[in-house]
Image: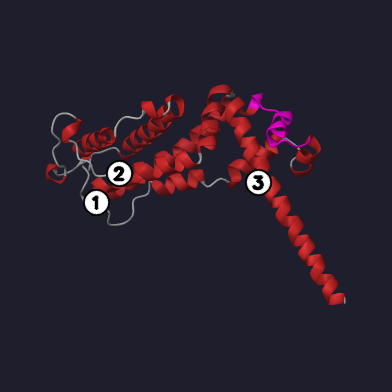
Amino acid sequence: MVIEQHAIARATAGLRDRRRARKREEILKAGLKVFAEKGYRGATMDDIALELQATKGLLYYHFETKEQILKAILAETQLIAGLEAGLTIPEGMPLREALHHAVKRSLDLMESNGELVRFLHVQALLSGPDAELVYTQVLERLYGAGARSIETFKRSGEVRPDLDARTFGQLLVHFIISRFLLKQIFGHRAQPPREYVDSVMQILLDGIAADKATSRPVASGVAGADRQP
């Protein structure tokens, strides 16, 4: 009987833990949505409770302040680490494929974390210097990931030795972010055709390749652009 009671107690405790974890996840999603729409300073716990369709008492049971919610969102997201990984080139991948790989993986990840990316932009635009500093630190990590990948190709001789790797890393990150933001702001109509990405990648290759023979020429206009994904 005692053993059965202990088993029931463990099962009950496990159920409570799972329910608490699910509710916590729901709160973080609601908080992120509100932060993305209103910015951190403009958002209130009332707004989050309303988005969650729950009482403030339930919200305060899990988090005492919106700052705790924000810290949990940033601590638990895999977005930044995922983007860094996306900009990290797998060993042995040719330069051309590497550029397409970095752009595609990064855009896919940003799409799947659209609320957080929008929040980071709103936070930078609507909040003070502290928020801008956080956003800058995010960008710094991504610039560094892009630069490290290019340094790998410099060592292998595929990229010009005089190329500033950090500048190229910044350029690549800015291109990825601008593609994402255009779609977020204007919808699919603002998305250039796939050939546009191919043409941009070709221009970048022409500018950084150590040996022009490694960069295939592109005919004028998007019709002659390479169409590899």
- Left or right? Give the position of 42 relative to 17: left
What secondary structure is marked by label 2? Answer: helix
Tag 2: Cα neighbours inside 10 Å, few (<14), some, or many (≥20)?
A: some
Q: Nearer the viewer, mark 3 or mark 1?
A: 3
> What residue is disc 1 on?
94
Pick whichever of labels 2 and 3 is earlier in the sequence. Answer: 3
Pick whichever of labels 3 and 1 is earlier in the sequence. Answer: 3
On the image, the x and y values in percent for residue 159 come to: 22, 44
The numbered dot on residue 141 is none
Pick whichever of labels 2 and 1 is earlier in the sequence. Answer: 1
Q: Which residues are magenta?
A: 41-55
> What colouring style does the render use?
secondary structure
Tag 2: amino acid? His
Number of numbered discs overlaid on the protein picture: 3
The numbered dot on residue 25 is 3
On the image, the x and y values in percent for residue 184 come to: 45, 29
Q: Residue at x 50, y 36 (%)?
A: 114
The foreground one among 192 and 207 is: 192
- Give the CA separation, mark 3 to mark 1: 40 Å
On the image, the x and y values in percent for residue 74 come to: 59, 41
Q: Residue at x 81, y 38 (%)?
A: 57
Is residue 23 covered in magenta? no
> What residue is disc 2 on?
100
Tag 1: amino acid? Pro
Tag 3: amino acid? Glu
Tag 1: Cα neighbours inside 10 Å, few (<14), some, or many (≥20)?
A: few
Q: Residue at x 53, y 23 (%)?
A: 125
Residue 140 seen in the current view: yes
Q: Main secondary structure of the magenta part?
A: helix
- Give the CA separation, mark 2 to mark 1: 10 Å
Is 13 drawn above or below residue 108 in the view shown? Answer: below
